[in-house]
Image (tube, coloured by chain):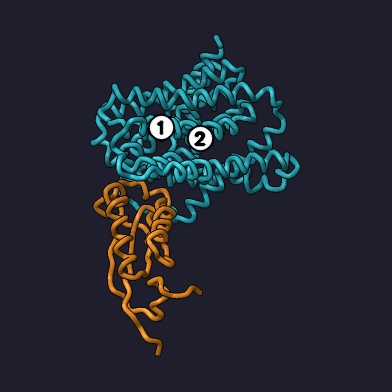
Amino acid sequence: MDGGATLDLALVNLTSPPLLAFVLGLVAAGLRADIRLPEAVYQATSMYLLLAIGIKGGVALRDTEASDVVGPIAITVVLGLVIPVAAFWLLRWWTRLDRVNRGAMAAHYGSTSLVTFTAALVFLEGAGIAFEGYVTTLLTVLEIPGIIVGLMLALGGAASNAGSRPHWGETLREVILGRSVLLLLGGLVLGWATGPVGYARIEPFFGGIFTGVLTLFLLEMGLLAGQQWRAVAQAGPGLVAFALVFPVMAGTLGVAAGLAVGMGVGGAMALGTLCASASYIAAPAATRLALPDANPGVTLLSSLGMTFPFNLIVGIPLYFAIAQFLSRWI
Amino acid sequence: MTARGRIVCITIVAEALLERRIVDDLARCGAQGWTAMVGHGHGPGHHGVSGFEGGNVRIETLVGPDTAKRIWAILEQEYFPRYAVTAWEYDASVARTSRYDGTAGGD
């Protein structure tokens, strides 16, 4: 695929219904219009997406040889440890954030964004580009380690939490038994167990209307991301630079790592997108519980307000182009 | 008509993800029960985190004065310095006071 075709794909991405709905949400936030989904609908939509992605990934996992997935899982665990450490140290040079806030940021950037990942898969499917069926397994693998590493970096030697009770048990419970991991993992097992025959019976609900539900969810996410922008003036150039540059660095690392363990261009791009994305569901809850002194306004502004829109609009086609470019050498 | 007695009603509004921790602390302080409701709003400690993840939770509990003191102590020590938490109390007139102040035999 040449550069022109990649540009065409980028334009198709820009005019896809989910992305246009996201932009509508951003505009609505700018106009202070109240088009938020009712809380219960938001929660149900989020659960639907997690379960649908999990089930679909589980069905695809049946066609995967165990030996094919060992390398990608191992490299994903390594990425889950390396990325938050890199984020933590880069933030030290680029921003004036203290240790606790840098750790909270590291937890967000070490973990992943389901919706960014989903948008990447929709991009690949729309372009007819194949990707490995086990990529959803990598999403599940990458959810947890980054959060734990980030929390450990924040708490390592930190005196700011002295006096408050450590809540590691509660935090780990939130990370492991929270909606994200449980529904993704449960969906993977469910999809793997039921296989293509069982999936065919639920496909109209979990496959047929999936992009429509994603469109609705991204309208809400656009609104929430746009609401964060009101605080962007307080961010400082270092945080803005981090939110926009670090995803490209982590994404390139993820793409290269994926190609190095034998993944195709589509799969490596999906892994790169996972590495580039920042969590805004599991990590905020975990850091709020474990790091009450961290400022959630900073982490949400960065992960949800800047990195998330950047990845959706620019990042996804960019990581695909990087995957195509690097695949000539790796 | 059932006789009424005086009891303290404490209301706590907090980030929803703190619900489990707060109700555990209420039980540790001696509260016999609570009612929790989801909600949304804005306050001086607002930071946006509960704007998209579960909103706020409003927890109400009826307790005796000694339990109320223990609850206020833990709120001041653990929650007020770190989280967007609001709490208030008022005297309530309730039937079957012993159900709330810990003197009931249990039912």
Which quadrant of the structure image shows residue A124?
top right
Of B96 and A282, nearer the camera is B96
Q: Amino acid at mark 2?
A: Glu
The x, y position of residue B71, in whole percent, is 33, 60
Q: Residues within 10 Å of mark 2 (few under 14, many from 20)?
A: many
- Of the chain colours in the picture, the one used for chain B is orange
Report helix, strand or loop for mark 1.
helix
What number is the disc on residue A152? 1
Q: Which residue is mark 2?
A: A143
| Number of other residues with Cα within 10 Å of mark 1, as a class: few under 14, some 14 to 19, many 20 or more | some
* Side (left or right) of A62 relative to A162: right
Which of the chains is cyan? A
Q: Which residue in the rendered view is the most extreme toward the bottom?
A: B1
Please determine if labels 1 and 2 lie on a single subunit.
yes
Residue plotted at (35% across, 55% down): B14
Q: CA distance from mark 1 to mark 2?
A: 16 Å
To which chain does the residue with label 1 belong?
A
